Amino acid sequence: MGLTLQQMWALQFHVFPGVGPARMENILSAGFDVPAALAAAYASLTSLSERRALLARLTPPPGRAPISKRLSAYFYDFLTSADYGTRLN
């Protein structure tokens, strides 16, 4: 049995501190169901503060967990950082 891209994306997010199924569902239901969708949303915003707060601005569905400003900023910084090295060095 194979995994869909959305399932792979969700599984990757589960390793982030503070991200559980309810928060992941919140992100996916907002339309960020693949990495490219979230990257496009970040690119559409003009300021760093808007980009870092993007996920915190989502209104969670009833019974779902909101995303804090701190977690939203963590997602942005993690996904857009150019400071990662390579393990081959």
Image (cartoon, rainbow, N blue to C red):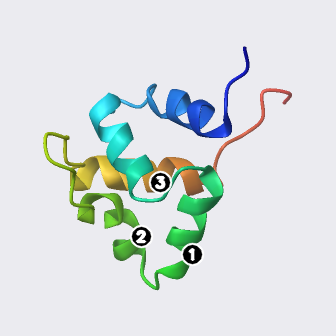
Give x and y (percent) for residue 4: 67, 33
Task: Report the number of discs.
Answer: 3
Residue with the mark numbered 2: 51
Give x and y (percent) for residue 37: 58, 61
Observer-side mark, 3 or 2, equals 2
Give x and y (percent) for residue 43: 57, 75
Q: Nearer the viewer, residue 39 or 33?
A: 33
Placement of 40 over or under 22, stated as above or below: below
Mark 1, Cα crowd under 10 Å, few <14 / some 14-19 / many 20+, is few
Residue with the mark numbered 1: 43
Quadrant housing the C terminus: top right
Q: Residue at (46%, 56%) from the top-left corner?
A: 76
Quadrant housing the N terminus: top right
Specify the amino acid type for callout 2: Arg
Say the numbered circle drawn on residue 77. 3
Q: Earlier in the sequence, mark 3 or mark 2?
A: 2
Q: Nearer the viewer, residue 81 or 2?
A: 2
Give x and y (percent) for residue 79: 55, 50
Answer with the quarter of the image where residue 8 lies: top right
